[in-house]
Image: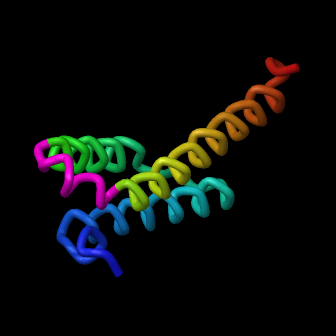
Amino acid sequence: MSAASESPAGAELRQLAALVTAALAHLAEGRAIDVKALESRTQRLCRSLATLPPEESRGYLPILDDLLAGLDRLGQAFALRLEGALHAQGGGA
């Protein structure tokens, strides 16, 4: 395990990734999720990481890549859910 993944910021990144995974599961079940809380935590963490020296912040890149991939999947899931809702209402193609 790298020093970045053992740090408080690394732990927060892993927690955010877990929240994204949980959000994906909730969407798949048709449940609501709190996007604002996820957004604010992500913004706060990114601001914190931006203050680190470059050599230290590079250690977070693999974890950030995983988080970004999860956020991309979440965005796609939202788009599919919206498309399905519009289609069900007769407004989609």
Q: Is residue 12 above or below residue 90?
A: below
82 vs 50: above or below: above
For image coordinates 65% across by 45% down, the residue present is: 77
The residue drawn where x is 37% and y is 68% is 14
State which quadrant residue 1 falls in.
bottom left
Residue at the farthest front position: 55
Residue nearest the observer in this picture, 80 or 72 = 72
Q: Nearer the viewer, residue 32 or 51?
A: 51
> How many numbered discs, if any?
0
For image coordinates 26% across by 41% down, the residue present is 43
Which colour scheme appears in the figure?
rainbow
**What segment carries the magenta color?**
51-60
Q: Does 25 sit above or below residue 2?
A: above
- Viewed as shown, does residue 51 lie left or right of 68? left
**Residue 12: image location, x then y, percent:** 27, 65
Magenta stretch holds residue 53: yes
Residue sitting nearer the eye, 91 or 20: 20
Q: Is residue 67 above or below residue 43?
A: below
Asked whether 47 falls inside the magenta stretch, the response is: no
Q: Outermost residue toward the right?
A: 93
Q: Main secondary structure of the magenta part?
A: helix
Left or right: residue 66 compared with residue 78: left
Left or right of 75, for residue 6: left
Image quadrant in which the C terminus is located:
top right
How far across and down, in percent of the image, does residue 35 sit? Answer: 41, 44
Find residue 83 and report its horizontal and vertical position in percent: 75, 31
Residue 38's x, y, as percent? 36, 49
Residue at the bottom extreme of this rendering: 1
